[in-house]
C-alpha cells in the first residue's frame, strides 16, 4: 500500500482509512489554466470543488461528492531566488521532493513536521507543524501564495501586496481549502545547515518538571509519553557546526525500521487482538529505544518514516498549560480502563500571525493522541478532547475533533476576519463541504 490516499472504483479514501468519499468526477489538471477551467466548469454544473493532496488528514476536510481536484501533475520547482532566499513550488509537490531538491541546491526550510509525504499545499492548508522554540509551522515560512478563486481567476498574495492581498495572505497560508485552490507557494529558505539530534529516555515527571528549561535550552524539543508507563522518549535538535555523523545504515534500519515500524506494527496487532496485554507491551516499548546522538541535514533529522497506520487527534494548548494538561491526560488514562498502545507526542510552536493557525497569537504546546488504525478510538479521543478544550485547546484542522464554528469563534480572536474574507472570495460556497460547514458555519 502506498503512503498516499487511494482511489478505487471512484471511491476516494484517506491515508488513515477513516474517511471515504465518492466524487462525481476527479480531475488531474496539468496547469493552472486547466485547474481554473475545471473550477469554472464545476460552478456551471452546480458541483462543489475540493482539492486533495496525499490524504494525510484524518478529518473529512478534502471529502466531496462534487469535483475532486488531484494535483499530482501540478508539481515541481518554479523558481529558486537566491537573492531573496525563496523557492516557489507548484502546489502538488510532495514535501519530500522539495526537501531533496533544496538539499541538492544547498538550501533548506528552517523547520518542518515529522513526516514529509504530504503535498506542500495540503500540509500548509491544514497547519502542519514540527516543533520549535523560535521557528514555527510550515505555513509560517510562506512568503507568497497563488490560488484559483471561486470565479476561476488566479489571485496572488503576499505580505507586501495591497491591503486586500495582505488580508488574503494572512488567512490563506492556513486556508483549509475554504478560500480557493492553492496552485503555487513561495517559501523562505536558508543555506543548508546541520542539526545534531539527541534522543534519550526520561521519566514523565522529570520532563514535566524541567519542561520550561528543556524548551528554553533547545531550538527544537519534543517528547513521546507512553501511556500506562511513567516513561518518555525525548528528542532535542540543535544546529551544529558538524561534522556530519548520520545514523549508520544498520543502526538506522534497526531503530527506525525494525523497532519503530516493524516491531511496533506487531505490538499494535497484538494490542488490538488482546487489549489486556497493552500495558505490558507499553513498558517494553518505552524502553526499547536507547539513547543516541547523530548529526545530519535538516530533513533527515526532522522527519522519519511512519509506516504503522493510525488515527490521530491533536490539540494546541497555551504553552504554559502543558504540564497541567498532560498530567490530567495521564490521570484520565490511568483510571479509565482504556488501553492505549500508541505514544502521546508533545511539541511546541511560537506565536504566529496567521488568522486560523493553531498558534495564532499565542505560544503553543501540541499534544497528539493516536490509536492504531482499526482500533476503536472514540472513547479515548472523547475523554482527551474534554481535557484539551478545558484548557482552551485548538484542534489541528487535519486531525480528528468534534468542534464547530461556535467553538472556534471563541477560540480564535480573528475567526470573524477569516469568515468575512471567505464571504468575499467564495460567496456561493463553491469550496464548501460538510467539514467546512461545521467548522466555519454555513
Image: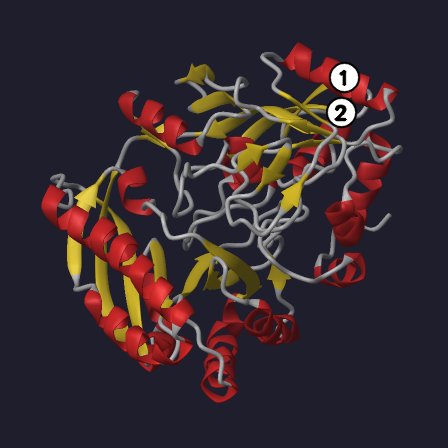
Image check: 162 left or right of 31?
right
Of residues 341 and 152, the one nearer the viewer is: 341
What residue lies at 24% left-to-right and 49% top-to-bottom? 257
What residue lies at 74% left-to-right and 29% top-to-bottom? 24
The residue carrying mark 1 is: 153
Label 2 secondary element = loop
Image check: 396 left or right of 436?
left
In percent of width and height, residue 263 lies at 25, 59
Of residues 181 and 413, the one nearer the viewer is: 181
Image check: 289 left or right of 397?
left
Of residues 65 and 139, the one nearer the viewer is: 65
Image height of 158 relative to 209, above or below: above
In percent of width and height, residue 248 lies at 11, 44
The residue carrying mark 2 is: 149
Q: Disc 2 vs disc 1: Cβ atoms closer than 8 Å?
A: yes
User: In the figure, residue 409 lies in which quadrant?
Assistant: bottom right
Instruction: Name the quarter where the N terminus is drawn.
Output: top left
What residue lies at 27% left-to-right and 69% top-to-bottom? 285
Q: CA distance from mark 2 to mark 1?
A: 6 Å
Amino acid at each position: 500500500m502506498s503512503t498516499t490516499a487511494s482511489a478505487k472504483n471512484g471511491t476516494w479514501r484517506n491515508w488513515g482509512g477513516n474517511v471515504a468519499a465518492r466524487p462525481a468526477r476527479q480531475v488531474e489538471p496539468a496547469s493552472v489554466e486547466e485547474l481554473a477551467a475545471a473550477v469554472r466548469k464545476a460552478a456551471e454544473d452546480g458541483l462543489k470543488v475540493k482539492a486533495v493532496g496525499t490524504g494525510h488528514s484524518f478529518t473529512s476536510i478534502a471529502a466531496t461528492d462534487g469535483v475532486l481536484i488531484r494535483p499530482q501533475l501540478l508539481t515541481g520547482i518554479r523558481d529558486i531566488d537566491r537573492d531573496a532566499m525563496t523557492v516557489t513550488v507548484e502546489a502538488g509537490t510532495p514535501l519530500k521532493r522539495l526537501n531533496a531538491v533544496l538539499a541538492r541546491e544547498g538550501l533548506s526550510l528552517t523547520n518542518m513536521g515529522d513526516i514529509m509525504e504530504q503535498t506542500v499545499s495540503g500540509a500548509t492548508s491544514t497547519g502542519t507543524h514540527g516543533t520549535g522554540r523560535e521557528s514555527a509551522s510550515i505555513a509560517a515560512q510562506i512568503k507568497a501564495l497563488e490560488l484559483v478563486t471561486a470565479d476561476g481567476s488566479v489571485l496572488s498574495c503576499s505580505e507586501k501586496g495591497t491591503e486586500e492581498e495582505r488580508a488574503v495572505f494572512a488567512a490563506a497560508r492556513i486556508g483549509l481549502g475554504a478560500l480557493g485552490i492553492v496552485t503555487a507557494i513561495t517559501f523562505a529558505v536558508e543555506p543548508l545547515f546541520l542539526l545534531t539530534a539527541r534522543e534519550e529516555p526520561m521519566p514523565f515527571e522529570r520532563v514535566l518538571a524541567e519542561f520550561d528549561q528543556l524548551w528554553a535550552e533547545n531550538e527544537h524539543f519534543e517528547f513521546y509519553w507512553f501511556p500506562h508507563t511513567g516513561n518518555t522518549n525525548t528528542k532535542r535538535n540543535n544546529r551544529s557546526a558538524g561534522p556530519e555523523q548520520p545514523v549508520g545504515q544498520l543502526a538506522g534500519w534497526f531503530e527506525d525500521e525494525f523497532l519503530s515500524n516493524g516491531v511496533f506494527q506487531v505490538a499494535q496487532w497484538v494490542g488490538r487482538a488482546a487489549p489486556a496485554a497493552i500495558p505490558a507491551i507499553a513498558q517494553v516499548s518505552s524502553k526499547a529505544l536507547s539513547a543516541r546522538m547523530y548529526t545530519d541535514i535538516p530533513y533527515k533529522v526532522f522527519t522519519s518514516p511512519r509506516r504503522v497506520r493510525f488515527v490521530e487527534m491533536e490539540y494546541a494548548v497555551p504553552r504554559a498549560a502543558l504540564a497541567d494538561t498532560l498530567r490530567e491526560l495521564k490521570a484520565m488514562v490511568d483510571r479509565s480502563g482504556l488501553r492505549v498502545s500508541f505514544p502521546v507526542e508533545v511539541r511546541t510552536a511560537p506565536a504566529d500571525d496567521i488568522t486560523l493557525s493553531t498558534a495564532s497569537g499565542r505560544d503553543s504546546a501540541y499534544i497528539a493522541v493516536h490509536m492504531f488504525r482499526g482500533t476503536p478510538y472514540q472513547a479515548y479521543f472523547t475523554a482527551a478532547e474534554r481535557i484539551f478544550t478545558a484548557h482552551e485547546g485548538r484542534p489541528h484542522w487535519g486531525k480528528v475533533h468534534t468542534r464547530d464554528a461556535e467553538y472556534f469563534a471563541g477560540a480564535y480572536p480573528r475567526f470573524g476576519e477569516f469568515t468575512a474574507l471567505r464571504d468575499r472570495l467564495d460567496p456561493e460556497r463553491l469550496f464548501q463541504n460538510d467539514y467546512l460547514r461545521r467548522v466555519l458555519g454555513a
